[in-house]
Image (cartoon, rainbow, N blue to C red):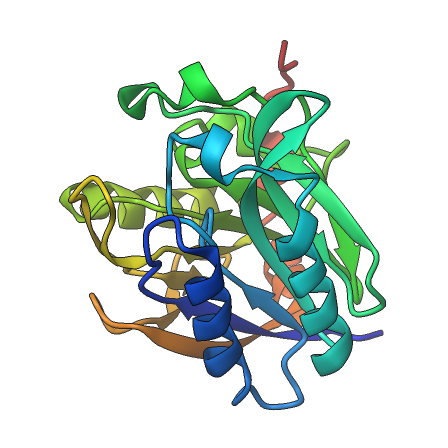
Amino acid sequence: MNSEITLATVQFDIKWEDSNHNMNRLDELLSSLPKEVDLVVLPEMFNTGFSMNPKNIALDNGSEVLQWMIQKAKQQNFCIVGSIATKDNKKFYNRLYWVFADGSYKTYDKRHLFRMADEDQFYNSGKSKTIIIYKDFSFCPLICYDLRFPVWSRNTQQENYDCLIYIANWPAVRSDAWYSLLKARAIENLSYVVGVNRVGTDGNNIEYDGKSVVFDFTGKTIDSHIIGSESISIQTISKTKLNEFRTKFPAHLDADDFEVL
């Protein structure tokens, strides 16, 4: 049993709606990763920033940016995850792509669209979660505003996972909420939680301070980035330690049943 996975979380300054620049910057950042990295996590809309201009930036089913992710995954033998403004059947989605090392991939469309930025006016909402099985771990990847809705991320017997991943463009003005909610999701779900955010200032003059972090299943910080700076952080998470804790403290067995409509 492969009881550990090594994560690389990438916190960087996304240049506004400039996909070529951002791909080149990521080429530089990812080139120095050690071979033991299993999974690379990028921020939300990592190639453009959180833009409400899908007619200008959305790519047909991920297009060349998805191909870039596939190439990176194959070349460096890791999984890579991030979201892209995507056009699919004449509709726009904030779509997360999880690309495996063999070039295959799975997707998740952001369910909770950020109405305060009119995201719900430009993009379509996703309808279901995606549980990813990789090296004996189960992952549940979600996007930014999804973090505020604990029912959507609740760990259940039907959709059980070991690690929640939130990729985001979460503004600095609300970074305390970002950190607190990530910690809460870890504690209530007895799960690792990985939160990856951007830094810098976007095309709407919104500032981001990152605060990317990894929490363990007790809510303890086991990895974090320098606030406000570009950086890559590497952390190993353990399925064995998670299972041991869940056996000693099986709070999940007393969880309420519910149905998401």
Residue 53 locus on image (x, y percent): 40, 31
Q: Is residue 134 left or right of residue 19?
A: right
Q: Is residue 209 left or right of residue 76?
A: left
In the depicted view, which residue is nearer to us: 50 or 174? Answer: 50
Residue 70 visible, this orientation: yes
Residue at the (56%, 20%) spot, across then down: 125
| Looking at the image, residue 170 lies above or below residue 136 | above
Q: Quadrant of the C terminus?
A: top right
In the depicted view, which residue is nearer to us: 250 or 120? Answer: 120
In the depicted view, which residue is nearer to us: 84 or 110? Answer: 84
Residue 212 locus on image (x, y percent): 35, 61
Residue at the (48%, 31%) spot, across then down: 54
Residue 174 locus on image (x, y percent): 19, 41
Furthest residue toward front = 56
Q: How many marks?
A: 0
Q: Quadrant of the N terminus?
A: bottom right
Residue 77 locus on image (x, y percent): 75, 78
Furthest residue toward top = 261
Q: Is residue 187 left or right of residue 231?
A: right
In which quarter of the view is residue 120 placed?
Answer: top left
Residue at the (70%, 81%) spot, across then down: 76
| Looking at the image, residue 177 lies above or below residue 47 | above
Residue 190 visible, this orientation: no
| Looking at the image, residue 162 lies above or below residue 33 | above
Residue at the (24%, 41%) spot, across then down: 177
